[in-house]
Image: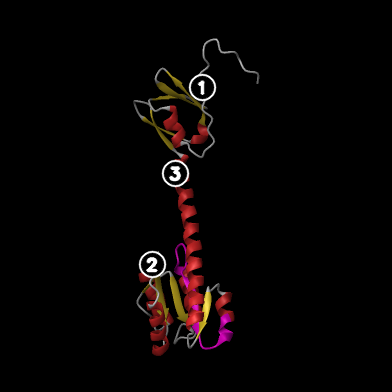
């Protein structure tokens, strides 16, 4: 189970301690250093980059909403999940206007807290799947350039430039628009490099083999 790094921003000590207690009961949660103001939260976020932030809507100085907007600006790729905590349910509107995952009313209710944790885990799982797809896409795009050893040098080829490849005299002839490159790699090895891309290997015509109709 992946560990979720959580941060709390709460200026009321009792509320902060209560939330810390609830989070400590979750085996997959690690609590980062806590903040008591919006300004502290922004600084701590930059240092620790938590997965989720529980923050009070109203804090001295920079409010929770203002802190969230600043953190989103500072996030390079994916901002953390935000859970607003408040004693007033009317602030829930503010929470969802800035795409917060959820909000918790003080004093905290254990059943409601578990519902929030369920939302957090689901959202983080979806984010992880999205990142995984992006990484696979990046790995796939890495094959956009091929290094072919022709015996004397390494030739850089784009897969789109290959018309076809055919074995010839223990070598592999790779036909492109501009040239024919001979390599000691096998046709199977080339196909593995081009896996998932449009590639149509040719096979040599045997002596006496009849021509096929187009």
Q: Nearer the viewer, residue 106 or 44?
A: 106
Q: In the drawing, does residue 214 fall left or right of residue 42? A: right
Q: Position of residue 183 (x, y in %)?
A: 40, 25
The residue at which mark 2 appears reads as 3
Please say whether residue 88 is one of the residues in the magenta stretch.
yes
The residue that mark 1 highlights is 203
Task: Mark 3 or mark 2: name the one nearer the start of the chain.
Answer: 2
Q: Quadrant of the N terminus?
A: bottom left
Where on the picture, by quarter, is residue 168? top left
Q: Earlier in the sequence, mark 1 or mark 2?
A: 2
Q: Position of residue 87 (x, y in %)?
A: 51, 88
Any part of residue 12 in sight = no
Asked which quadrant contains residue 184, the reply is top left
Q: Which residues are magenta?
A: 74-92
Which class describes the residues within 10 Å of circle 3: few (<14), some (14-19), or many (20+)?
few
Q: Return the residue at label 3.
A: 142
Which secondary structure, mark 2?
A: loop
Q: In the picture, residue 154 is in which quadrant?
A: top left
């Amino acid at each position: 189970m992946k560990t979720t790094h959580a941060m709390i921003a709460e200026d009321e000590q009792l509320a902060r301690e209560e939330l810390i207690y609830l989070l400590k009961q979750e085996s997959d949660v690690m609590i980062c250093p806590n903040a008591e103001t919006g300004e502290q939260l922004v600084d701590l976020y930059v240092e620790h980059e938590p997965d989720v932030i529980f923050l009070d809507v109203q804090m001295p100085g920079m409010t929770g909403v203002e802190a969230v907007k600043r953190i989103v600006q500072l996030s390079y790729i994916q901002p953390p999940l935000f859970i607003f905590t408040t004693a007033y349910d009317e602030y829930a509107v503010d929470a969802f206007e800035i795409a917060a995952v959820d909000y918790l009313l003080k004093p905290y209710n254990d059943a409601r807290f578990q519902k929030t944790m369920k939302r957090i885990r689901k959202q983080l799982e979806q984010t992880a799947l999205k990142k995984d797809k992006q990484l696979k896409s990046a790995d796939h795009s890495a094959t956009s350039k091929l290094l072919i050893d022709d015996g004397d040098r390494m030739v850089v080829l784009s897969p789109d430039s290959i018309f076809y490849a055919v074995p010839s005299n223990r070598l592999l002839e790779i036909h492109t628009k501009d040239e024919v490159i001979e390599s000691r790699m096998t046709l199977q090895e080339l196909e593995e490099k081009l896996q998932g891309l449009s590639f149509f290997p040719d096979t040599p015509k045997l002596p006496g083999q009849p021509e096929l109709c187009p």
